[in-house]
């Protein structure tokens, strides 16, 4: 009995000791509780949204190895601790002033921080709207803890899921708060026990170290990629950047890229370099020297009736589709035959690697918003052509239809939003809407039967088969027995990913075959200029990446370009801005020779105002690429990166890098000048020879 009593007393003493230690470090523990929970959910969402720890679609960086993951998580915890530690200090000092010492004070801090972060993360990662085919059903299943059947509309589930979770969480928090209020601790040491200074001193040390750490991270592409998606890092780096933005131009020392002239508000990263003012606003190669815009060749061609034109754009089409085989079977036999009897451009390129900008370059015949060149649809309407748009995607995405004239009066318009009930995925998001190849072919045949074929016709067809994740529930398995599931699309399964992709291309080829079959059945194949090209390519992990639009290389920008016209003579690099003219010349049976082997195709990653990469590629694939993030250039012939200073010092490469940067500055300037109606009067640059 005595031993039992002693054990009971000792147990109570131990509990009291533990309770004292907890209370002594109550502020530190409250902050730690917040950051651990936030860290857990934020990292989970980063993985769900970006596949940040395994690599995924459109992702240039991932933390795949154990050391990389540990380093990223530790730095992430550092910024979370610093942010929530500072917020905690303010909260606890306020509580002291109000003589609030109970456990409810610290519980309330924890709950408030978690609720604010929970709502913010829900909005940030677009729980209510970001679901699309890129992440498909897996994300809802992960967040909701269950499976979602095909055909269930995303919107209702997203709203119900998010709202339901928040209601449950808030209810639990309120219940616990009421319990704590009615069972408030009253031990004397709650007020008498000195507060631990660990949190205070940790924050003092971190306030000294954090600026140096942030400066280093901002210069490291690999770490910055993931940390910029962290709320705490963005808030802290933005705050530090604002403190060092002495000239109030929006750039300081802690964002990326950094301001090279902290006390001159005319000079900052991405600034418009105004020609002729003797100021180097963007910090590159001195004051801008513009390249004259070449005259529009379509202005020299009289609009008139010609052959019918069918322009087919294949989503995510790699140039090697004509030669690719799966199990000894050609992936694209129809397009191979068209190329054999017609013409295939060996070196055709996407300018941007993005669907929206690629289509606008194709239809508007230029990379900028400008009226220097006649738009394809405008020219064809002036020539008396009937215009039909039949697309497997939502052409309102990125305002493609509006900016290219697809929805002009007199244009017959059909796209995935027009036939939204026939979409292959449940999501109604513009970036997700897709129609099957069968549905697009059905609409083509219907529209074809309605046309007055005595009048020249232009038809634009868009086949979405090869769009990520390279399959949909009703896609035909023409080359594979099974599609790779979305959750298994990782670098380790590269061969299965590629097989699924090539099967999708085979479905697009089948659709092209139905178009050719319809033309031949109506004896119109030889009276039609048929043009087939890709909007951009796709990396299939062979260069370490999956997707497109984040690198200037062969996989992501080299595209197929095939004509059924055998009379084209192509011996130069072709950009998408050239294709409309080639199609018109083919339809009008005009000389169609493209023989300038020195012509460069301009390419970029990002937007024209502030790209991360720009490049020129010539016939044969010879490239020069400039990376604004590191101010280095890549030469394909040397297969190495060199600093801008090294390139300028090299007599062989100096002119190339100067031409590349001047080409970009010229495009940027003319677009700005057009949008601002000639504020700086660049009319003297609007004529000259083609470069």
Image (cartoon, rainbow, N blue to C red):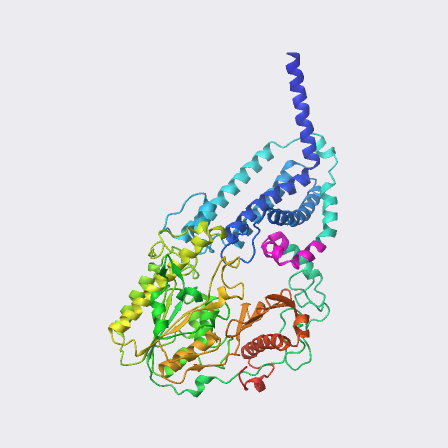
Q: Is residue 551 left or right of residue 485?
A: right
Residue 268 seen in the figure: yes
Name the foreground residue: 67 vs 443. 67
Q: Is residue 635 left or right of residue 27?
A: left
Indicate the quadrant containing the C terminus: top left, top right, bottom left or bottom right. Answer: bottom right
Residue range in magenta is: 211-233
Residue 60: percent from left, percent from top: 55, 58
| Residue in the image at 65% along x and 31% along y | 185
Name the foreground residue: 208 vs 93. 208
Name the foreground residue: 313 vs 108. 313
Q: Is residue 526 left or right of residue 124?
A: left
Q: Is residue 219 left or right of residue 355?
A: right
Residue 342: percent from left, percent from top: 36, 75
Indicate the quadrant containing the N terminus: top left, top right, bottom left or bottom right. Answer: top right
Residue 255: percent from left, percent from top: 65, 61
- Whether 216 is drawn above or below 70: the answer is below
Name the residue at the top extreme: 1
- Whether 171 is drawn above or below 529: the answer is above
* Figure quadrant of residue 10: top right
Number of numbered labels in the structure image: 0
| Residue in the image at 52% along x and 59% along y | 543
């Amino acid at each position: 009995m005595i031993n039992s009593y002693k054990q009971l007393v000792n147990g109570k003493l131990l509990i009291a000791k533990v309770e004292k230690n907890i209370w002594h470090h109550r502020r530190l523990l409250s902050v730690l509780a917040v950051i651990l929970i936030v860290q857990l959910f934020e990292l989970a969402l980063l993985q769900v949204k970006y596949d940040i720890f395994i690599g995924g679609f459109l992702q240039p960086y991932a933390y795949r190895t154990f050391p990389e993951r540990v380093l990223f998580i530790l730095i992430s915890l550092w910024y979370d601790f610093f942010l929530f530690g500072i917020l905690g200090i303010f909260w606890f000092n306020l509580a002291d002033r109000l003589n609030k010492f109970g456990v409810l004070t610290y519980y309330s801090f924890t709950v408030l921080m978690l609720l604010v972060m929970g709502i913010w993360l829900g909005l940030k990662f677009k729980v209510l709207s970001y679901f699309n085919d890129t992440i498909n059903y897996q994300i809802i299943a992960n967040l909701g803890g269950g499976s979602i059947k095909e055909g269930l509309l995303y919107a209702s589930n997203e709203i119900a899921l998010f709202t339901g979770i928040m209601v449950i969480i808030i209810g639990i928090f309120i219940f616990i708060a009421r319990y704590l209020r009615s069972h408030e601790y009253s031990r004397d040491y709650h007020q008498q026990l000195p507060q631990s200074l660990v949190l205070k001193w940790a924050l003092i040390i971190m306030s000294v170290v954090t600026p140096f750490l942030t400066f280093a991270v901002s210069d490291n592409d690999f770490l910055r990629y993931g940390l910029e998606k962290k709320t705490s890092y963005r808030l802290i780096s933005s705050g530090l950047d604002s403190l060092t933005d002495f000239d109030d131009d929006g750039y300081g020392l802690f964002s990326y890229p950094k301001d090279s002239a902290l006390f001159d508000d005319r000079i900052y990263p991405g600034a418009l370099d105004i020609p002729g003012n003797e100021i180097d606003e963007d910090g590159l190669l001195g004051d801008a020297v513009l390249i004259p815009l070449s005259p529009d060749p379509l202005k020299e061609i009289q609009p008139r009736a010609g052959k019918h034109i069918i322009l087919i754009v294949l989503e995510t089409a790699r140039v090697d589709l004509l030669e690719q085989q799966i199990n000894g079977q050609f992936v694209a036999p129809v397009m191979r035959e068209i190329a054999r009897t017609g013409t295939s451009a060996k070196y055709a390129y996407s300018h941007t690697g993005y669907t929206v900008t690629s289509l606008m370059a194709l239809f508007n015949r230029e990379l900028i918003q400008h009226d220097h060149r006649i738009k394809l649809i405008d020219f064809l309407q002036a020539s008396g052509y009937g215009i039909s748009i039949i697309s497997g995607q939502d052409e309102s995405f990125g305002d493609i239809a509006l900016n290219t004239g697809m929805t002009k009066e007199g244009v017959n318009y059909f796209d995935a939003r027009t036939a939204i009930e026939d979409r292959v995925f449940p999501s109604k998001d513009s970036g997700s809407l897709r129609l099957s190849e069968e549905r697009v072919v059905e609409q083509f045949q219907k529209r074809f039967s309605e046309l007055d074929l005595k009048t020249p016709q232009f038809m634009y067809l868009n086949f979405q088969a090869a769009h990520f994740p390279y399959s949909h529930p009703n896609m035909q398995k023409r080359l594979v027995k099974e599609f790779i599931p979305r959750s298994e699309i990782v670098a380790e399964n590269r061969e299965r990913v590629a097989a699924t992709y090539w099967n999708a291309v085979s479905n697009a080829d089948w659709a092209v075959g139905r178009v050719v079959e319809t033309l031949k059945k109506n004896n119109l194949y030889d009276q039609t200029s048929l043009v087939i090209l890709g909007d951009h390519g796709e990396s299939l992990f062979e260069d370490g990446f999956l997707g497109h639009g984040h690198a200037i290389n062969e996989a992501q920008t080299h595209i197929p370009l095939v004509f059924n016209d055998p009379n084209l003579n192509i011996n130069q690099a072709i950009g998408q801005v050239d294709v409309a003219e080639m199609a018109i010349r083919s339809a009008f049976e005009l000389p169609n020779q493209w023989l300038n082997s020195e012509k460069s195709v301009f390419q970029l990653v990002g937007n024209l105002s502030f790209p991360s990469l720009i490049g020129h590629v010539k016939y044969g694939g010879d490239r020069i690429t400039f990376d604004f993030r590191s101010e280095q250039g890549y030469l394909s012939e040397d297969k190495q990166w060199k600093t801008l200073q090294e390139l300028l010092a090299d007599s062989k490469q100096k002119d190339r890098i100067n031409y590349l940067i001047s080409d970009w500055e010229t495009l940027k300037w003319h677009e700005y000048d057009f949008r601002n109606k000639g504020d700086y009067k660049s009319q003297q640059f609007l004529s000259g020879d083609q470069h």
